[in-house]
C-alpha cells in the first residue's frame, strides 16, 4: 500500500532547507502523529508502505529526509552529520509545525536520533519504535556499513543501480525479486546531472565517522536508551538475521528496560523494511496503546 502525501519543508537551526513527506491522517479521533526517521544512507521513501498504513489508521505521519539525504539540503559542514544535530533538526520541524509531542519511528540511525532526542527534548517523545538498532552496535554490522557508506561509486544505468542495491542488501532481504531491487534502486538513487543514477545522499555523511576513527565503533548510548525505554512506551524490532543488533545486545536492552515491547521479524537482516507482516502487526499492536 502506498498513499499520497504532501511535500513539506522546514528550516534547520543553521539555515538548511529540509524535506519531509507529510501523510494526512484518515478521518477519526485526533491521535498523536508519527515522525519516521530513516537509516544512514536512506531517505523518507523507505517508509512509503508503513507510513501509508499508519495514516490510514488515523495518524498523521511525517517521514523526514535527514540533512544530506533525499530532497533535504546537503550541509556545507559535513561535521554536522551527527545524531545530535539531526535531533535538533527534528525539534525544529516540530516547532515550525506546532507539534508538541509525537510517536517516533526510527530505523537504524533513525533510532539513534530518537535516543539523542531523549537527551535534547524528552517531552517531545510520547512513545518510540526502534527498528533494528541499539545503544551499542555489533562490530560486524558497523564494518559492513562502513565498507560502502560514502564510498565512490560508478553507476551508468538503472539496471546497474538495481544490481548495486541487491549486492549491498541481498543478505538482509533474501526474499527480494528483481522487481523489488529495481524499486529499491528508485528509492535510493536519483537521476544525476549527466542522466545516470547517483546515490541520493551526500558522500560526506560518513565524514564524522571517519574522523572519530575507532571511537565511532563503540558509541555509548546506554544512558539515552535507559532514559527513553524506562520512561516512554517503547517497541524494539529486530531482523532475525541482523548483523548490527545482535541477540546479546537485545538481551541487555530487555534487561535494562523490562517493560519494553519486543518483536522479531523472521528471515530478514538489517533492517526490516516494516512492510513485513510481523513488523506491521507489532507496530499496530503497539500504536493501539498510544493515544
Image (spheres, rainbow, N blue to C red):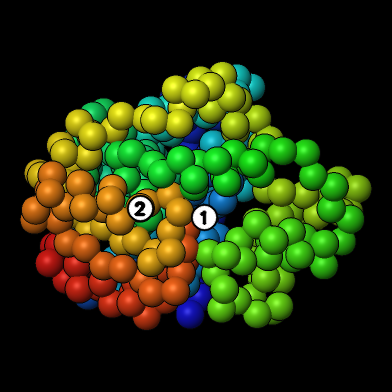
Q: Which residue, given by chain and number where applicable, does mark 1 sit on?
A: 44
Residue at x 15%, y 37% (from the top left corner): 227
| Residue situated in front as seen by the camera: 84 or 253 | 253
Residue at x 71%, y 71% (from the top left corner): 182
In the picture, the disc for residue 256 is none
Q: Please tell me whether mark 1 sits on a helix, a strand or a loop.
A: helix
Q: Please tell me whether mark 2 sits on a helix, a strand or a loop.
A: loop
Circles 2 and 1 in contact, beta carbons < 8 Å = no
- 279 up-or-down from 104: above or below: below
| Residue situated in front as seen by the camera: 127 or 265 | 265
Q: Which residue, given by chain and number where applicable, does mark 2 sit on?
A: 246
First-in-chain label (2 vs 1): 1
Could you tell me how many numbered marks the image carries? 2
- Residue 204 location, quadrant: top right
Residue 132 percent location from the top left of the image: 37, 55
What is the distance, in whole Å, between disc 2 and disc 1 at their CAs? 26 Å
Residue at x 56%, y 51% (from the top left corner): 42
Density class for disc 1 (Cα within 10 Å; few <14, some 14-19, many ≥20) is many
Density class for disc 2 (Cα within 10 Å; few <14, some 14-19, many ≥20) is many
**Dot in front, 2 or 1:** 2
- Residue 185 location, quadrant: bottom right
Residue 202 percent location from the top left of the image: 66, 36
| Residue situated in front as seen by the camera: 193 or 165 | 165
Q: Is residue 230 left or right of residue 111?
A: left
Residue at x 46%, y 69% (from the top left corner): 268
Q: Is residue 68 left or right of residue 182?
A: left
Residue 208 percent location from the top left of the image: 54, 24
Please state, as top left, top right, bottom left or bottom right, where the C terminus lies in the image. Answer: bottom left
Amino acid at each position: 500500500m502506498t498513499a499520497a502525501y504532501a511535500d513539506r519543508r522546514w528550516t534547520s537551526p543553521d539555515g538548511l532547507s529540509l524535506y519531509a513527506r507529510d501523510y494526512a491522517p484518515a478521518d477519526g479521533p485526533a491521535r498523536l502523529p508519527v515522525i519516521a526517521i530513516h537509516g544512514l544512507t536512506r531517505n523518507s521513501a523507505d517508509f512509503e508502505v508503513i507510513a501509508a498504513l499508519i495514516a490510514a489508521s488515523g495518524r498523521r505521519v511525517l517521514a523526514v529526509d535527514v540533512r544530506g539525504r533525499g530532497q533535504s539540503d546537503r550541509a556545507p559542514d559535513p561535521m554536522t552529520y551527527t545524531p545530535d544535530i539531526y535531533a535538533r533538526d527534528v525539534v525544529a520541524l516540530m516547532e515550525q509545525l506546532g507539534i508538541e509531542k509525537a510517536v517516533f519511528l526510527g530505523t537504524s540511525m533513525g533510532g539513534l536520533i530518537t535516543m539523542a532526542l531523549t537527551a535534547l527534548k524528552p517531552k517531545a517523545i510520547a512513545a518510540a519504535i526502534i527498528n533494528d538498532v541499539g545503544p551499542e552496535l555489533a562490530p560486524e554490522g558497523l564494518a559492513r556499513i562502513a565498507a560502502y557508506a560514502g564510498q565512490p561509486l560508478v553507476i551508468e544505468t538503472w539496471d546497474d543501480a538495481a544490481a548495486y542495491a541487491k549486492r549491498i542488501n541481498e543478505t538482509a532481504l533474501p526474499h527480494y525479486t528483481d522487481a523489488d531491487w529495481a524499486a529499491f534502486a528508485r528509492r535510493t538513487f536519483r537521476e544525476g546531472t549527466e542522466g545516470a543514477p547517483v546515490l541520493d545522499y551526500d558522500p560526506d555523511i560518513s565524514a564524522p565517522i571517519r574522523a572519530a576513527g575507532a571511537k565511532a565503533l563503540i558509541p555509548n548510548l546506554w544512558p539515552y536508551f535507559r532514559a527513553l525505554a524506562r520512561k516512554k512506551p517503547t517497541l524494539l524490532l529486530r531482523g532475525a538475521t541482523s548483523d548490527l543488533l545482535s541477540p546479546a545486545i537485545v538481551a541487555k536492552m530487555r534487561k535494562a528496560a523490562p517493560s519494553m515491547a519486543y518483536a522479531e521479524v523472521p528471515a530478514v537482516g538489517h533492517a526490516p523494511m516494516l512492510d513485513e507482516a510481523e513488523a506491521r502487526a507489532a507496530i499496530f499492536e503497539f500504536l493501539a496503546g498510544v493515544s
